[in-house]
Amino acid sequence: MKLDVRKIGQGSTTVNLPEGSTVLDAVRASGFSAEGCIVTRERAQVSLDAQVAHGDTITIVSNVKGGSEELTATLSRLGRGQEKVVFQRGEILGDLLGRHEPDGSRVFLNGREASLGEVLQNGDNIILAPNVEGGQ
């Protein structure tokens, strides 16, 4: 099976792996190192022992600490307004929302329903929409 592996700032490559391969197998086959990095599959953080599938895109992001760059997103709660929120590079949506009282709402990231394991990017738009029940 073929999949793409990219490391931010270093490029990307396509690797061929047998069925049953893991994220770690893909990283090793790419020649990139994942040491001290965050690894994602389709923008969701993933463990190195997770299995990969044909067509997956694996992204390796350096876990940068410090620096002066402020990463922000806009957090909107329907009926409660918007706020600018600050997060760390490599932070996942669930961690950010854990600090901002998610209250069991549906979560949308940049216009689509989102998984709490997705890695945030500077400028993301997050919407918390209350679950609506009712009808007959």
Image: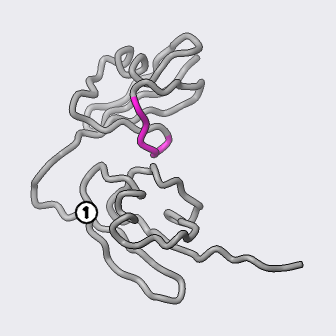
Residue 124 in the image: state x and y as whole percent: 40, 64
| In this view, 92 is above or below 41 | below
Instruction: Indicate the colouring scheme.
Output: one colour
Please give left or right for residue 29 compared with residue 107 in the image: left
Q: Which one is in front, 131 or 35? A: 131
Q: Residue at x 38, y 64 (%)?
A: 98
Residue 55 in the image: state x and y as whole percent: 58, 29
Q: Label 1: which residue?
A: 71
Considering the whole magenta stretch, tell me its main secondary structure: loop
Q: Is residue 10 magenta?
A: no
Q: Residue at x 33, y 35 (%)?
A: 60
| In this view, 66 is above or below 34 | below
Residue 47 in the image: state x and y as whole percent: 41, 32
> Which stretch is magenta?
42-47
Q: Residue at x 27, y 62 (%)?
A: 87
Please give left or right for residue 15 compared with residue 64 in the image: right
Within 10 Å of disc 1 (Cα), the crowding (few <14, some 14-19, many 20+) is some
Q: Residue at x 41, y 74 (%)?
A: 75
As drawn, which residue projects farthest toward the left?
Answer: 67
Please give left or right for residue 4 compared with residue 33 in the image: right
The residue type indicated by label 1 comes to Leu
Q: Which one is in front, 18 or 97? A: 97
